[in-house]
Image (cartoon, grey):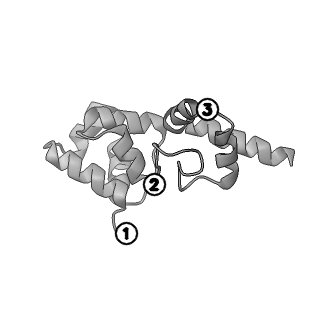
């Protein structure tokens, strides 16, 4: 499977830092196989914790990682994540922009639960 943007970014930054997957795993507490899956393109998105751990362990920013996953974190609610369901965007749009930014980076699992709850109420 060809690498996605995320896998290419992580592999190139890891190599730039002179790290093996095992070394990056030890630095970030992310399982080596999980790193390999991302680098191979089998995983296209990361949770907030893993995103932050990679940003701390590699010469890469959270914003670069989010962009590689398809998120435009500097836009308004209509343009933030390209991969979220339209219902998730409607939930996100209820919050001020500074809170939207926090939600996108730190609370994606919460947002996904909110969307499922909203769908159940329909």
Quarter residue 117 falls in: top right
Secondary structure, mark 1, is loop
Which of the pair 72/9 is nearer the observer? 72
Which residue matches tag 2?
70
Q: Is residue 26 visible?
A: no
Name the residue rendered at 13%, 43% in the picture. Answer: 18
Mark 2 or 1, closer to the camera: 2
Cα separation between marks 3 and 1:
39 Å
Tell me, for residue 1, which label it has, or none.
1
Cα separation between marks 2 and 3:
21 Å
Mark 3 or 1, closer to the camera: 3
Name the residue rendered at 34%, 68% in the picture. Answer: 2
For the residue carrying disc 1, how many other residues have a C-alpha within 10 Å: few (<14), some (14-19), or many (20+)?
few
Residue 32: percent from left, percent from top: 32, 44
Disc 3 to disc 1: CB gap under 8 Å: no
Name the residue rendered at 42%, 46% in the picture. Answer: 66
Residue 74: percent from left, percent from top: 45, 43
Secondary structure, mark 2, is loop
For the residue carrying disc 3, how many other residues have a C-alpha within 10 Å: few (<14), some (14-19), or many (20+)?
few
Tell me, for residue 96, which label it has, or none.
3
For the residue carrying disc 2, how many other residues have a C-alpha within 10 Å: few (<14), some (14-19), or many (20+)?
some
Residue 70: percent from left, percent from top: 45, 54
Which quarter shows the N terminus? bottom left
Tell me, for residue 46, which label it has, or none.
none
If you read the primary sequence from the N terminus, does the residue marked by circle 2 or circle 3 appear first?
A: 2
Q: Is residue 80 visible?
A: yes
Position of residue 120 relative to residue 7, above or below, is above
Q: Viewed as shown, does residue 72 lie left or right of 99?
A: left
If you read the primary sequence from the N terminus, does the residue marked by circle 3 or circle 1 appear first?
A: 1
């Amino acid at each position: 499977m060809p690498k996605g943007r995320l896998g290419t970014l992580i592999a190139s930054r890891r190599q730039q830092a002179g790290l093996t997957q095992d070394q990056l795993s030890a630095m970030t507490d992310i399982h080596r196989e999980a790193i390999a899956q991302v680098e191979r393109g089998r995983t296209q998105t990361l949770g907030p914790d893993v995103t932050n751990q990679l940003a701390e362990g590699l010469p890469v920013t959270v914003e670069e990682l989010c962009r590689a996953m398809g998120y435009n974190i500097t836009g308004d609610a209509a343009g933030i994540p390209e991969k979220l369901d339209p219902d998730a965007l409607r939930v996100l749009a209820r919050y001020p922009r500074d809170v939207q930014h926090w939600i996108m980076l730190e609370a994606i699992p919460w947002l996904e639960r909110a969307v499922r709850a909203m769908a159940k109420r329909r």
